[in-house]
Amino acid sequence: MTQHVTGDPAGRPDDTIVSLATAPGRSAVALIRLSGPEAFSIAAKHVSPWSGTPRQARLCTIHDHGEALDQALVIVFPGPDSFTGEDIVEISTHGGLLVPASVIAALLSSGARQAFAGEFTRRAVLNGKLDILQAEAIGDLIDARSHAMRRSALGQLDGGLSRRLLVLRQDLIGLEALIAYDIDFPEEDDGPVPRERIEGAIRSLRDALEKLLATGSVGELIREGAVVVIAGAPNVGKSSLFNALVGRSRAIVTEIPGTTRDAIEAVIGGGTWPLRLVDTAGLRSTADSVERMGIEVSERYLSDAHVVLACADTEPGLEQTVRLARAKSSAPIVPVRTKSDLVSSRDNLAVPPGAVSVSAEAGTGLQDLLSAIEEILGKSQGEIEPDFPMLTSARHRHAIEEAQSELLGFERAWREEKLPPTVASVHLRAAVVALEELVGSIDVEDVLDRVFSSFCVGK
Ligand code: GDP
């Protein structure tokens, strides 16, 4: 049963839609969601006994053409107090492939339509149950690969970022009003609006936008993961280190197949940041291996890296590897002395300061290495302020940059007094629009198309 239905749901908001909300396959339970104006009448044809009592779980028989399909738990959520804002019926059937598919087929035969990707959340947005930032947060929560991402997505779902943006929008509108007052009532008894008041409003808006924008790099890092490149000559133990680190956090590893042809990548979580470990080892065997290290690790990875692990299994090799890595990357470097199990304890003392010694074979030093990476990222990216909302995607950053540049445009025009204030305030309007588009209060359809292009069916 394939669940990837794509298409344009925009023109069909009155259809009653159905979909499996859980992943298809062998499982104890599968959740089917039915939403729309006919949800109750369609469900009533297949659910016995049917009861419209809101939000009460009831064990029912699901049937089609007189044949029982399953015993399932049915809950009814009348709109508008539901996830989508429409009438919803949730049916928890037994899992597997056949049972949920048969129940969905029965509902389809009675007039429901298979939902498009992200259509439930899209309806929630269109019906004012969620704004776009909250809808994005649902996607981020499902895709979360680290606790930091989960926390940030949950804060965004709770409306933290939306509230912050709406305060900024109000402040921009306040500034617009000051300018409009100045234009409309220049001869008022109270006199014109003092310049300092407008200056102050501009300054505080500038600072607030700046502060929010500064969260962008941390937010995107939390979402995308920090790129940690394992660099070094062939045979120093890079692949073994990669496997040991991945194996250590097996529970939260996500393999990303096919993202590159010239490297293996895996995301490991568990710490503050998801780490995108990149192993470029074993790709080319070269004679003058150390000298070719810079070639072995592709320039692209080194330039994208947030941290480079410069690996070597000898002292001179380590110095040379660090030097080569430094020449190729501006990212912080952790010197990693590999195969420490082969080194006698006397030699081990010779590991240079700041270097971490690890043994993939014995599994030692791995936690020290992860802590060193965390510390470096904490220093270079700044601490995460627990309750301050963060920008977590390029879409967020672009909108704030847009608002910032419009505010700057206004400030220039207003200071130089070359443009009439009415024209200067066009910039303020554009800044307001940039924030509104980010939260999703205007041009909803257009923004929705972009946001939901990555959603799967049933969300
Ligand atoms: P790469 O080419 O840098 O990826 O190196 P590999 O991970 O393929 O390792 C090269 C060789 O070193 C293999 O024979 C590994 O078994 C061995 N090796 C890797 N790590 C360790 C280690 O921690 N201890 C020991 N004793 N051998 C290791």
Image: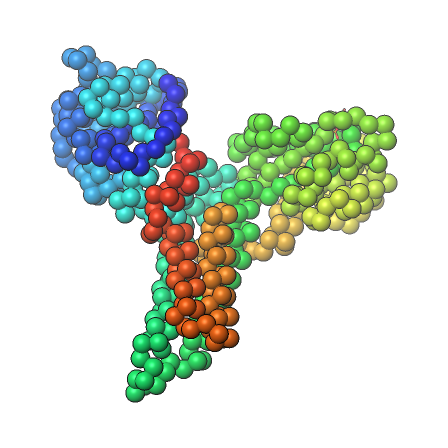
Q: Quadrant of ligand 1?
A: top right
Query: Residue 69: image x %, image y %?
Result: 23, 15
Q: Is residue 112 above or below residue 369?
A: above
Camera sees residue 434: yes
Q: Is residue 427 above or below residue 3?
A: below
In this figure, which colouring scheme has been used for the structure?
rainbow
Camera sees residue 457: no
Residue 233 is left or right of residue 453, and the answer is: right
Query: Residue 176: image x %, image y %?
Result: 37, 69
Query: Residue 26: image x %, image y %?
Result: 39, 19
Query: Residue 352: image x %, image y %?
Result: 80, 47
Q: Identify the image quadrant of residue 432.
A: bottom left
| In-front residue for pair 390/237 | 390
| In-front residue for pair 355/332 | 332
Q: Residue at x 51, y 43 (%)?
A: 223
Q: Identify the image quadrant of residue 7.
A: top left
Q: Residue at x 35, y 17 (%)?
A: 97
